[in-house]
Image (tube, rainbow, N blue to C red):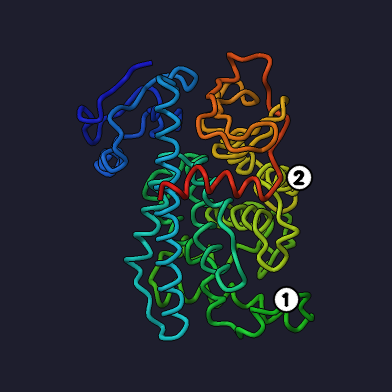
Amino acid sequence: MNKIKVGDLTPNKVFESNLYIGNGSLFLCKHVPLTADDVNRLIKWQIDDVYSGEEQDVVDKGDLSKVFERFVKDRVTFATIYEKCIGTVKENFTSFQSNNIMSLGRMKEVVNELHSMVAKNANLLLNVINAREVTIESHFFVRSTDVAALSLMIGNAIGLPDERLKSLGIGSLLYDVGMLKMNQALVRKIGKFSAEEFQQMKMHTIVGFKLLVQVFRLDPETALIAAEHHEQVDGKGYPRGLKGDKISQFSKIVSIAQAFEGITKNESRPDTKRGLYDAMKIILQEAPTKYDTDMVKVFLSTMSLYPVGSLVAMNDGRKSVVFMPNPNVPMRPIIKIIFDANDNYLPDGEIINLVDEKTVFIKGIETNAVLVMKAANELYKIRE
C-alpha cells in the first residue's frame, strides 16, 4: 500500500496501479490519466490521502471509531445532496411539462453531483437511494434521479471514462422525458393497460428521442437512451424489437438501472418492492433474456453481500449497521452494534471487525421496517 497526499497529485499523471480512497472505494483505474476534476473532487470531499496498490491492501481501517464517524458524516452529506438533486429534477421537469422550459445546465449539475458521489462511495449512495420513500406524486422525479445514479454506477463499474460517464448521466437523467408529453391521465393510471393504451404508452420512447435530439441537442448516442431503454437483448422489447449488439451500450446500461430501481421501489404497490439482495438475484436471473449478462455481472460484483449502511441481525440477537466492507471476506464486514437483543438503541454500541471476531456473525438483513426506520433516525437524521 502506498499513501499519496492529495496535494501532491497533478493532472495528467498516470499510475501503474488503481487509486483508492481510504474506505476501499475505487477512485481511479490504473493507466487512466488523472484530471483536474478528479483532484477537485477529492478536495471537495475533504479527502487528504489516496492509496495505490491492490484493493485488499488499501482499506485504511485506522481508528474504527473515526472511520464510523466519517461514514455517518458522509451518509448525511450524501442524503442532503441527493435530496437537492431530486428537487432540481422536479423543478425542471415541472417547468418543462407546463412551459417547455428546462435548464440543461442545471440538469448537468445534478449529473456532476451524482457522479461525484458514485466516485467517492457508490455503495453508500445506493444505501441513500434505497432508503428514500416514494409516493405517486414524487415517483417520476425520484425515479429519474435514481436511474441516473444507478446508470453512473454501472458505467463506472464497467470502466467508462469520465466524459462518456457524463454523457451517460445526462441521457439517463432524461431517459423518460417523453412521458412528460404523454396523456397524463394515462401515465397516472394504476393497473393494466388495454392493448390500445399500451400502444400509446410505447410512443413515449419515440417522443423522448425526438426531444433529446431536437430540443436538447444531445448527440445521437445519448439520445438513443430515450428510444431504446425498453429494448431487450432477446428482441422482445420495444419500440423496434432490437436484439443483442443492435442495442446501444448506453441503452443497455439504463435498462438495467431502471429495472433495478423498479424492483427496489414500487410507488403504486409498495408491498411488492424488494431489498437490494433480492433485486440483485432477480436481475441476474433475467439477464439472459432481457439484459447484457456481462454488464450485469460486473455491476453486481461491485455490490457488497451486506451493503454499506444496511441494518443486519446478528446471531446473538443484536442488530448492527454495516459501515465498512472487508472486500476479500464479504460475509464478515466491519459493523457497529446499535440495538441490543431487545431492540433497545445503543448509542455507544461496540464496533466489531467480524474478521477478527469469530464467535459473532451476521444471520441476515434486518427486514423489520420500523426498526430500520428507527436506526436511520438515530444514526443520521439527528445529525442533519
Q: Is residue 142 above or below residue 253?
A: below
Whole-percent x, y for residue 127 in the image: 55, 45
| Residue 305, visible in the rendered structure | no
Quarter of the view holding residue 306: top right
The secondary element bearing badge 1 is classed as: loop
Whichever of callouts 1 and 2 sits on the residue coming sooner in the sequence is 1
Which residue position is annotated with label 1? 190
Label 1 neighbour load within 10 Å: few <14, some 14-19, many 20+: few
Quarter of the view holding residue 205: bottom right
**Side of 144 relative to 115 (left or right):** right
Which residue position is annotated with label 2? 285
Whole-percent x, y for residue 167 in the image: 41, 56
Q: Nearer the viewer, mark 1 or mark 2?
A: 1
Q: CA distance from mark 1 to mark 2?
A: 27 Å
Q: Amino acid at mark 1?
A: Ile
Q: Amino acid at mark 2?
A: Gln
**Side of 36 relative to 334 (left or right):** left
Q: Is residue 43 above or below residue 142?
A: above
Whole-percent x, y for residue 67 in the image: 42, 28
